Amino acid sequence: MIGAGIGGLAAALALAQRGARVRVLEQAPEIGEVGAGLQISPNGVVVLDALGLGEGARARAVASRAVRLIDGPSGREVARLDLSARDFLLFHRADLQALLLEGARAAGVEIETGRKLIGVTLEGARPRLRFKGGAEEEEVGFVVGADGLHSQLRRAINPPEEPFFTGQVAWRALVEDDGSAPCEARVHMGPGRHLVAYPLRAGRLINIVAVEEREAWAAEGWFHRDDPANLRAAFAGFGPEIQALLERVQQVHVWGLHRHSVALEWHRGRAAILGDAAHPTLPFMAQGAVMALEDAWVLADSLAALGLEDGAALYQARRRPRAARVIEAANRNARNYHLRALPTRLAAHTGLRLLSRFAPARLLARYEWIYAYDVTRDA
């Protein structure tokens, strides 16, 4: 397994539980506290339950009771989606990663850090891997690339391609809080921009993800520092609640949102890819980590069913159509959040208010095909 992120650790655990001997090779010198917030919807929670981690997950996460859609400039509520009867969990990424790491180690998975993959050869019967600082190639029985956007495995399996800049940038930040924030995700929508905020770690932190449309290009990756003043300036037209929240931001990261295609091939020989390595997604449906969890379960299930020679083809057949559909839904959501023309925005918000008041179940039903799906029961 290449990569000790959410998908890599989940796949390692799922494979180990089926009797496989698994090593996870992570390029970082140690697995530490990186990243910010994640929303894990019910279709991801069922995977955690199936892995035996559901109780620990619920103990470490904030259970989201609702999603509120808010008009950013006025601060008025547009709609409220009641999630109190559903498993929507709000995690700090490091907490979910730690839970998966504990589970993987308890199942006998070996974790090796400081192993940066720099090359892959798939021509022979067994994959051969090259690592930074290594004198020789290492031959393995099967390799899984859970190594993210710049996956070496994806490059070895698929022809090269270039992503394109969407004209959107995203900021992420964490601010300390006193635990009084409601257990819900708030989506503040405005012309050409939106901001999502939700509590983490029993409300001691507020996670912020803010997106703005702009022409200036920005690099990919979560680790580019920015001046908090730039974030505040981008949302200066939003209401007092957002102004007060952004005044508390002391450190912020920014990255450009680039669109990648879903990989044409997810496997070759005894190699497969999952998560962002196979299908990077824009952050408008909060499904990036959840899709990686789904991938992990199906890959392990498929390899257990058909073996190392044929299981990966079954995995791709089961996963690729769903991943592509979820990613397209995320692409559409960006447009829904950023309506610019005032008449269009007023009409859309009025429609949402009426639905929220008189037919709230219809709002959630729109994405029930995502949230109610149980990959652990999919044969």
Image: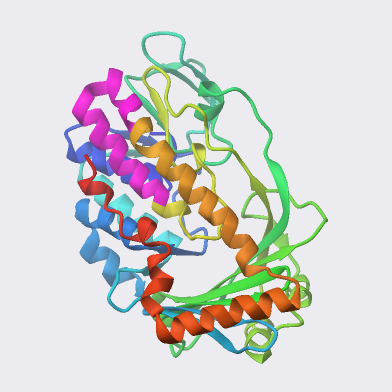
Write down the quadrant of residue 172 in the picture: bottom right
Please tell me which residue lies in front, 102 or 367.
Answer: 367
Task: Identify the residue at horizontal 44%, vertical 87% (top origin).
Answer: 357
Task: Identify the residue at horizontal 32%, vertical 69% (top origin).
Answer: 60
Q: Position of residue 65 (x, y in %)?
A: 36, 79
The secondary structure making up most of the magenta span is helix
Q: Is residue 322 visible?
A: yes
Looking at this view, name the residue that lies furthest to the top. 124
Task: Identify the residue at horizontal 55%, vertical 26% (top origin).
Answer: 133
Please tell me which residue lies in front, 315 or 106.
Answer: 315
Q: Is residue 6 left or right of residue 331?
A: left
Asked if the magenta segment contains residue 309, the reply would be yes
Q: Is residue 67 left or right of residue 217?
A: left
Q: Is residue 279 left or right of residue 88?
A: right
Asked if the magenta segment contains residue 9, the reply would be no
Looking at this view, name the residue that lies furthest to the right. 216
Q: Is residue 50 left or right of residue 121?
A: left
Q: Position of residue 230 (x, y in %)?
A: 78, 71
